[in-house]
Image (cartoon, grey):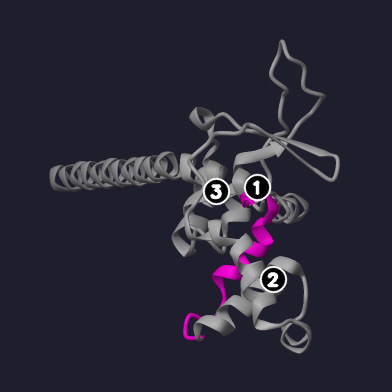
């Protein structure tokens, strides 16, 4: 039986990009082409309608998302990643998450995951959480996240979504407060300068 573990983020993004105006049969064929890694033309040329619907039935779970679930460790091609401490996100992480979130969470899910999951410095042991490398943008890490299975990705994304939203709202509030403080300081300095000039 197929599950969300059988679909990579790369495939999920391709599924999301399917033309919504296609009729039902064409949509199913496009989906199967992505999920099975078979060209559309080959499916149309060699599969019977019965073959198409039997295979499509195996992927019927796609109509509902996996449950939110926090999973802190991920291994892709031998590279080990760990979830960073959400309470200690750096400013660079916050800015990147906000940018990716605002331009589209689905098409940028791998980039958001690459901000939240960082390479481990050393092997995990059951008594002490692995230390993670400092955050910096990495094309390799973004590429790795595209190969993560969707149970892992969507489970974590749904879990993080509320938190990410709160963080970005908090960052915006902080930025607005800093702007107000800066404006007040400039007004005070301007007023003091006017008073000095008036006394002269």
Of callouts 3 and 2, the N-terminal one? 2
Queried whether the magenta region covers residue 174, the answer comes back as: no
Residue that carries the numbered disc 2 in the rendered image: 34
Dot 2: element: helix
* Residue at the front extreme of this rendering: 50
Q: With 47 as the anchor, is 188 left or right in this view?
A: left
**Is 59 located above or below residue 67 in the figure?**
below
Which residue is found at the position 40% from the left and 42% from the top? Answer: 162
At horizontal 48% and vertical 80% (from top left) the residue drawn is 20
Side of 22 where 127 appears, left or right: right
Residue 114 is marked as 1
Residue 86 position within the rendered picture, expressed as x and y whole percent measured from the top left:
52, 32
Q: Quick one: label 1, few (<14), some, or many (20+) residues within 10 Å?
A: many
Q: CA distance from mark 2 to mark 1?
A: 23 Å
The answer to whether marks 3 and 2 mark residues whose Cβ atoms lie closer than 8 Å is no
Label 1, secondary structure: give it: helix
* Tag of residue 104: none
Q: Residue 154 shows which numbered tag?
A: 3
């Amino acid at each position: 039986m197929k599950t969300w573990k059988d679909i990579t983020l790369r495939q999920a993004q391709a599924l999301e990009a399917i033309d919504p105006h296609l009729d039902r049969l064409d949509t199913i064929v496009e989906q199967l082409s992505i999920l099975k890694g078979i060209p559309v033309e080959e499916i149309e040329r060699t599969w019977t309608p019965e073959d198409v619907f039997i295979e499509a039935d195996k992927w019927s779970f796609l109509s509902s998302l996996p449950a939110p679930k926090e999973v802190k460790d991920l291994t892709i091609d031998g590279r080990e990643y760990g979830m960073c401490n959400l309470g200690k996100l750096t400013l660079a992480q916050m800015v990147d998450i906000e940018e990716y979130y605002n331009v589209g969470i689905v098409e940028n899910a791998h980039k958001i995951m690459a901000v939240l999951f960082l390479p481990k410095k050393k092997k995990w042991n059951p008594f002490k959480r692995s230390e993670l490398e400092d955050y910096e943008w990495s094309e390799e890490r973004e590429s790795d996240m595209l190969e993560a299975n969707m149970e892992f990705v969507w489970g974590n994304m749904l879990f993080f979504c509320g938190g990410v939203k709160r963080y970005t709202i908090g960052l915006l509030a902080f930025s607005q407060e800093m702007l107000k403080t800066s404006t007040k300081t400039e007004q005070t300095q301007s007023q003091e300068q006017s008073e000095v000039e008036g006394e002269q």
